[in-house]
Every structure is written in C-alpha cells, then in structure tokens.
Image: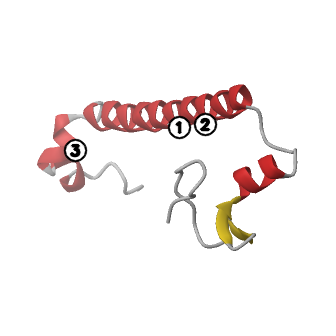
Amino acid sequence: MRCPVCQRFFCRECVTEHEDRMLCSNCLAGLSGKAMPADRYWHQQLLVGMQGLSAFLFLWYLFFLLGQMLLAIPHSFHEGTIWQSEWWRKP
C-alpha cells in the first residue's frame, strides 16, 4: 500500500485512518505539526546505509580470515597421513 500524500510504501501496522483517508505515520505527524524534518530523514537513511555496509565488510573480513586459516593447514593433514601417524598416542 502507498500513502496518498507522500507516495511512500507502508505496512499495515504503520497506517492510520484520518478523515476517511489511510495515511502513513510520518504524514499523520506532519498534519499534527510533529513531522520529522527532511534533512534528518536523509541523515538517518545514510546512517542506516553506512551501518549495513560496515556489517557487510566485517562479515566479508571474517570469511576471508576463515579462508586464510584453511589455507594455513599443512598438506599432510589433507592427504590423511596425519591420522595414520602415532603422534596422538602417548606411550
């Protein structure tokens, strides 16, 4: 659904009926004089975008480190020869 005033999408929980019209919460706040300023809205969206980008880069770095750890395992471990040796048994 879209708000008839600002044409933004909204969910059923964010909608309010006002004078026989369905309005989003931001437009309803604008009618009451408590609207969020437009510059604050874009700053908030920029902050959310930057947080999402930093989370993506952090997860990418963790996967990179996991790959580096897997590459550091010796080849003898992959060939199965390490399990054939007696290094884990104590006399």
Secondary element at image label 3: helix
Q: Where residue 25 appears, x then y in whole percent?
A: 72, 58
Q: Where residue 69 appears, x then y in whole percent?
A: 36, 34
Of marks 2 and 1, the one in the foreground: 2
Question: Tags 2 and 1 in contact by the CB under 8 Å rule?
Answer: yes
Label 2: few (<14), some (14–19) or many (≥20) C-alpha neighbours in 10 Å: few
Which disc is residue 77 wearing? Answer: 3
Q: What separation in Å lies between label 3 and label 1 (alpha carbons)? A: 38 Å
Quarter-of-image position of residue 42: top right
Q: Where residue 28 appears, x then y in whole percent?
A: 76, 56
Of marks 2 and 3, the one in the foreground: 2
Q: Which amino acid type is shown beneath numbered disc 2? A: Val
Q: Quadrant of the C terminus?
A: bottom left
Q: What separation in Å lies between label 2 and label 1 (alpha carbons)? A: 6 Å
The answer to which of marks 2 and 3 sits earlier in the sequence is: 2
Secondary element at image label 1: helix
Quarter-of-image position of residue 78: top left
Q: How does the figure colour the protein chain or chains?
A: secondary structure
Residue at 57 percent across and 61 percent down: it is 10
Q: Which amino acid type is shown beneath numbered disc 1? A: Gly
Residue at 15 percent across and 48 percent down: it is 81
Q: Is residue 48 above or below residue 14?
A: above
Secondary element at image label 2: helix
Q: What separation in Å lies between label 2 and label 3 (alpha carbons)? A: 44 Å
Residue most extreme to the right: 33
Q: Where residue 33 appears, x then y in whole percent?
A: 87, 44
The answer to which of marks 3 and 1 sits earlier in the sequence is: 1
Residue at 46 percent across and 38 percent down: it is 59
Q: Is residue 64 above or below residue 23?
A: above
Q: Residue at label 1?
A: 52
Which disc is residue 48 wearing? Answer: 2
